[in-house]
Amino acid sequence: MGSKSNPSGHRGRRPLSIFAVLGLCCFFYLLGAWQRSGSGKGDNLALKVNKMMTDCTVLPNLSFESHHNDVEIVEPSEPKAKVFKACDVKYRDYTPCQEQDRAMTFPRENMIYRERHCPAENEKLRCLIPAPEGYTTPFPWPKSRDFAYYANVPYKSLTVEKAVQNWVQFQGNVFKFPGGGTMFPQGADAYIDELASVIPIADGSVRTALDTGCGVASWGAYLLKRNVLAMSFAPKDNHEAQVQFALERGVPAVIGVLGSIRLPYPSRAFDMAQCSRCLIPWTSNEGMYLMEVDRVLRPGGYWILSGPPINWKTYYQTWKRSKEDLKAEQTKIEELAESLCWEKKYEKGDIAIWRKKINAESCKRKSSNLCDLANADDVWYQKMETCKTPLPEVNNKNEVAGGELKKFPARLFAVPPRIAQGNVAGVTAKSYQEDNKSWKKHVNAYKRINQLIGTTRYRNVMDMNAGLGGFAAALDSQKSWVMNVVPTIAENTLGVVYERGLIGIYHDWCEGFSTYPRTYDLIHANGLFSLYRGKCNLEDILLEMDRILRPEGAIIIRDEVDVLNKVKKIVGGMRWDAKMVDHEDGPLVPEKILREFDEIVKHSLLVIYTIPSLIHFYQTSRKSKFILCEGFSTYPRTYDLIHANGLFSLYRGKCNLEDILLEMDRILRPEGAIIIRDEVDVLNKVKKIVGGMRWDAKMVDHEDGPLVPEKILVAVKQYWVATTKKTSSNDE
């Protein structure tokens, strides 16, 4: 007959219990990781957040593993991830599609050599771009507008070449940007004040702007405080770092040029565009460059020209050009502007301003050379044409072609005209509003798990698959800006993004993005890897994300679970510590979220937080007929996990809390786990009692943050057995 006793040789737990404990291990690991954040050199804010969250983390010495089993369970080993090495330090500012050596093999005509020329598949760098020695987290906004660390952008050429133009100065170990420019020696603010005397900048009518040939983007930098968002571009040229300086300052910019290819923006995108001594030959190629500006300029939009040939009578000697040449150039620009249906509104000193008519019906002279309206937004690697982009038809001369926009910020959530008119396939006013609600919910969830989102710590933000711009709209703040990228293989929604008063760009993520390394603080990718599955190497996309992400930056990836499992495996070799968490609506939703922080050494340390809905607790009923002032009707060691929500507050003053805890200890199996949610003062008393009960206990904050008075106590019961004394023969 078998004995009822449990001999030492059979102390091993049953497989079901083992798997339960392993499951608890994963569960509490996620709970503990929920509010941890990366930190590194130069980022005091991140350090403070880490310190603040120390007490709400399940510390590593709280072990949920079984330590007493004799049977070793061997898990099947997974193949190791490919390990990516660091690139040579010479690639610290590598821009895949704008590299100088490759560029010099292309014609100089129409600036073709300055356009995008990406490496072939066998020429791609598949290594991690290193940060320069001494790299430091950039100054927070708005201080970053005026200062940048030399170590981050170690190029002094602009301080010499543009010294008299007051672009940038070198002081100690930092660059200072005094807000000057070639055509605004009194500063960008004074220049913008003059523009505002003609253009309604202050009332929200002008929200999106384009700066062609931006320098260090001081115009865009100073427009931001007037709630105007400028997309600035400049080529990667002998000045080396114009766009890099702009992004280091926290100002939107990309590497780009008006050459032979259309600009990567939709038609009717910008309320205002400017050329401030941008040196673009506006009259060449039959006015093709001005026609391209007309394509992206919104009906009723403004074009500003400051610099040659405006005010040529004063500057012809400085510009080393003849009066006749400059006068002829200005006359030609005037004629081109009139043919495009622009009306000259202002010319004084160094500045001239034209306004585009609100529709074609109000034009004095209608152009016979019209482009195909259906192809107005087909721009990716498409050649510019010497034709005028036609405007949508209107019913009367007072109607704005394409639809009138509300003033900002009302236009941010108003139904965009492209949607209202049914021009976006599958999107209605109702689905647009639902999309906005969803993104507000998503962004609120992000902010709960990473308190730096929405602060100046994440200044430069990118949405790699922007859709209708819902993520950027939900995040909208003076503290940050979002580059909304619409993939060329996705539904064309970039026009909607601009109609909301946001900015963005078309891009194919099978290629490198037109920016320098280390230029974005936060990167968001929603459904991107599912979109590109089977179209290009996901490894290349992840390496590009690593290239453009700043040290200590963060990444959020939302996608299907099978796709994220592949992504997670790849980033395992990229010095990212990646974790996957459930959708905020719960674990049954097939979409998951991958989150990360990037280490100061670059090469991405991924720290993943559990979304609150992953840790789901049920409310206890106060009508329970079981009275816990008494022992429960069960044997000892019968439960693996015990949960108590508000229990000790409920029984406070009704019975001895010590008795309840002893009863919990009695029915809990060795190495079983306990979760207690309650008010902090109650849990402090509980924690003091269990300190004498052989429990390993830690207290963590509520998932909505440390300010919530309710806390959580998690504990593991230690494994121990009673010892019996041997009886001597004299006692018999």
Image: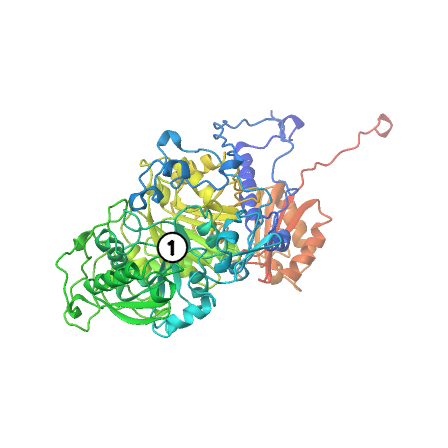
> For the view shown, which residue lies furthest in the right direction?
730
Say if residue 484 shows up in the picture: yes
Place of residue 80 in the rendered image (x, y in percent of width and height, measured from the top left) = 49, 28
Place of residue 208 in the rendered image (x, y in percent of width and height, measured from the top left) = 35, 63
Place of residue 350 in the rendered image (x, y in percent of width and height, measured from the top left) = 37, 67
Say if residue 476 shows up in the picture: no
In this rendering, the answer to whether 70 lies above or below 35 is above
Q: Quadrant of residue 197?
A: bottom left
Q: Which residue is mark 1?
A: 213
- Image-based side of 442 in relation to 491, left or right: right
Say which residue appears at 16% left-offset and 53% top-offset. Answer: 372
- Image-based side of 157 in relation to 273, left or right: right
Q: Quadrant of residue 405?
A: bottom left
> For the view shown, which residue lies furthest in the left direction?
368
In this rendering, the answer to whether 71 lies above or below 580 is above
Local packing at callout 1 (Cα closer than 10 Å; few below 14, some 14-19, many 20+) is many
The amino acid type, in three-letter code, at marker 1 is Gly
- Quadrant where the N terminus sits is top right
SS label for mark 1: loop
390 and 418: which is toward the camera:
390
